[in-house]
Image (cartoon, rainbow, N blue to C red):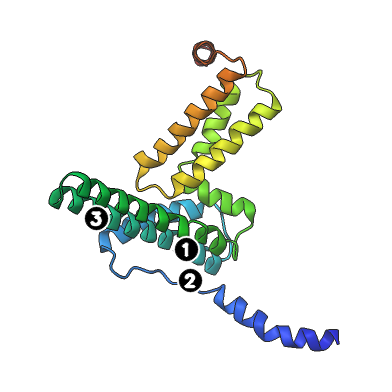
Amino acid sequence: MKKTALLLLLPLLTVLSASAQDVKLKTEGQDPAYVETIKGRSQKIVDKLGLADKQKAENVLNIVCNRYFKLNDIHEEADKAVKEAKEKLQGQERDAAVKLAEATREAKLYKQHFELEGALSLYLDEAGITAIKDGMTYGVVDVTYKAYCDMIPSLKDVEKAQIMAWLKEAREFAMDAANSKAKHGWFGKYKGRINNYLSARGYNIQQERQAWEERIKARQSKK
């Protein structure tokens, strides 16, 4: 019985294996210069994974590139709709059209948000997927987390966990942002939330920051 079940599964496993080995770069409708820019940016992210399997590395590269292409299409379409609304309409009609364009943008971003992680899961483990996410968001999660821990050495474990949780949440939003400014903007919003949280727990953020800056200067003077 087990042997029969295995034989039935083999064709399916073969199909899944084949489909997981060939990810095409979807450049239709994209500006050639933009494609090269994205390929270069994505290559730097993927190279940090150190993947020995060239086919796997190419598949991961194409997944990341295709992600950027899709995000660019969504943002460009929404920006165009907003611009046309502001140029051609007035008053409440204009405001309603702008609101609709932004709502459509958000709906499309949400709909495709989980596609990246799902596609990468065919080739990477959780650590690899996280590395891709960090690469697409400039490693802000790790840098910011370490900065908070260094700034406030007395942070409790539960507070560190909360900070990390919010930074990871910010990363999910930042991954869908249109540009680097917008990506950093998401982290800025969550840093405000973190600061409010720490203040409510009795930390004086301004004093902690001043003391931290003095410690940094002291470290640098010793070098």
The reply to whether dot 1 and dot 2 touch (C-beta < 8 Å) is yes
Residue sitting farthest toward the front: 92
Q: State the CA–CA distance, disc 3 to disc 1.
A: 27 Å
Q: Disc 3 marks which residue? A: 81
What residue is shown at x 59% (from left), y 15% (from top)?
Answer: 203
Compared across the picture, whether 183 is left or right of 50 comes to left
205 vs 219, nearest the viewer? 205
**Hey, what amino acid is under mark 2?**
Val
**Hey, what amino acid is under mark 3?**
Ala
Q: Disc 1 marks which residue? A: 63
Look at the numbered disc 2 and give the secondary structure of its residue.
loop
Q: State the CA–CA distance, disc 2 to disc 3.
A: 31 Å
Above or below residue 90? Residue 35 is below
What residue is shown at x 53% (from left), y 23% (from top)?
Answer: 196
Residue sitting farthest toward the left: 88
**Hey, what amino acid is under mark 1?**
Ile
x and y percentages locating residue 205 in the rendered image = 52, 16
x and y percentages locating residue 37 in the rendered image = 32, 55
Q: Disc 2 marks which residue? A: 23
